[in-house]
Image: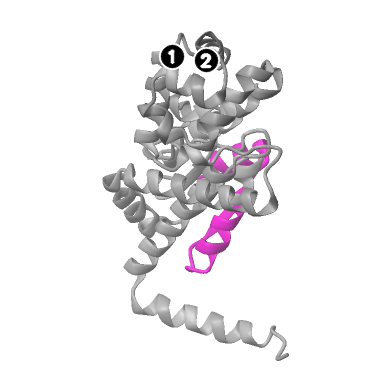
């Protein structure tokens, strides 16, 4: 179990816990940081349970014992100080839920930013600026990110297209050349259809920029890997934070390419803005 998942594991396990174990769980979720400093006797007293109950709680969430629990919690908080406060509970109010979603997203973005491979970002920007054609591949939630990316690059006067159908991806990939670039986007980094498309692009000597988790097959197979490791606090709903991180990476690439295009592009974008004003109401 990854340390950063611990608080959400606790939330998920509460319904199956005994009442006494659930009391310990709720105590931990109220103030995770304080738990790292407490002894087992302190937690038992604060939760009004026995020490063996605390041990049973630790084992119920997948830890070997009390010390293993404290170590896992400490690792989580060290990696992301606010993460332990973010686990969503069914009893959360709208205000609490809203705060947790925003806090989780901000926290994930900061972690992704701090771990970015800036050399690869620079390589990706240079390749995109020199590209004859740019294609964006993604499935599911990543398809929405790919569509957003195509819209942004279209505005840069770059020949671009987005494909979320594996057959269209394969056909298009087979027609690319060495001056063309594909941005392959994946939240899991393990989608086989996407990996098949990447191989076809590289067979045509095109360049693949992968936006995917570290050490995933998509990241490993890409020519330039832009790695996103966003722990999802709300996995049972949808991968929220990683999608926002993907969009932010796309924004970074877009602005980087725009910088290299210079004044001609700025004039073009100004003309676009002027043209769009006619489509807006004046009320």
SS label for mark 1: helix
Q: Image check: 34 left or right of 28? A: left
In percent of width and height, residue 97 lies at 64, 48
- State the residue at coordinates (39%, 40%): 81
- State the residue at coordinates (34%, 68%): 259
Q: CA distance from mark 1 to mark 2?
A: 7 Å
Q: Is residue 159 above or below residue 175?
A: below
Q: Nearer the viewer, residue 42 or 94?
A: 42
- Looking at the rendered image, the quarter that the C terminus falls into is bottom right
In percent of width and height, residue 196 lies at 55, 29
Q: Nearer the viewer, residue 225 or 31?
A: 31
Tell me the magenta residue range.
147-176
Q: Nearer the viewer, residue 158 or 236?
A: 236
Report which residue position mark 1 lands on.
66
SS label for mark 2: helix
Q: Is residue 213 magenta?
A: no
The label shown at residue 88 is none
Q: Nearer the viewer, residue 213 or 55?
A: 55
Q: Earlier in the sequence, mark 1 or mark 2?
A: 2
In percent of width and height, residue 111 lies at 39, 43
Report which residue position mark 2 lands on.
54
- State the residue at coordinates (39%, 34%): 77
In percent of width and height, residue 226 lies at 39, 42
């Amino acid at each position: 179990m990854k340390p950063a998942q611990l608080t959400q594991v606790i939330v998920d396990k509460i319904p199956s816990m005994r009442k006494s174990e659930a009391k310990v769980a709720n105590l931990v979720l109220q103030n995770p940081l304080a738990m790292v400093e407490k002894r087992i006797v302190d937690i038992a007293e604060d939760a009004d349970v026995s020490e063996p109950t605390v041990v049973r709680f630790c084992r119920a969430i997948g830890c070997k014992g009390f010390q293993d629990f404290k170590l896992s919690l400490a690792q989580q908080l060290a990696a992301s100080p606010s993460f332990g406060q973010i686990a969503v509970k069914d009893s959360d109010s709208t205000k609490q839920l809203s705060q947790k979603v925003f806090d989780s997203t901000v926290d994930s973005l900061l972690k992704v930013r701090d771990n970015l491979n800036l050399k690869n970002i620079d390589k990706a920007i240079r390749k995109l600026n020199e590209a004859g054609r740019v294609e964006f591949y993604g499935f599911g939630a990543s398809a929405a990110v790919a569509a957003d990316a195509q819209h942004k690059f279209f505005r840069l006067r770059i020949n671009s297209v987005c494909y979320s159908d594996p057959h269209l991806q394969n056909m298009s990939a087979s027609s690319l050349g060495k001056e063309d670039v594909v941005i392959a986007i994946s939240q899991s980094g393990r989608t086989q259809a996407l990996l098949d498309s990447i191989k076809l692009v590289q067979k045509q000597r095109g360049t693949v920029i992968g936006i995917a988790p570290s050490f995933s097959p998509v990241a490993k197979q890409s020519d330039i890997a832009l790695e996103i490791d966003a722990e999802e606090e709300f996995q049972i709903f949808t991968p929220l934070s990683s999608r926002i991180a993907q969009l932010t990476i796309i924004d970074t690439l877009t602005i980087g390419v725009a910088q290299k295009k210079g004044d001609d592009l700025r004039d073009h974008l100004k003309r676009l803005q002027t043209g769009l004003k006619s489509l807006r109401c004046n009320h």
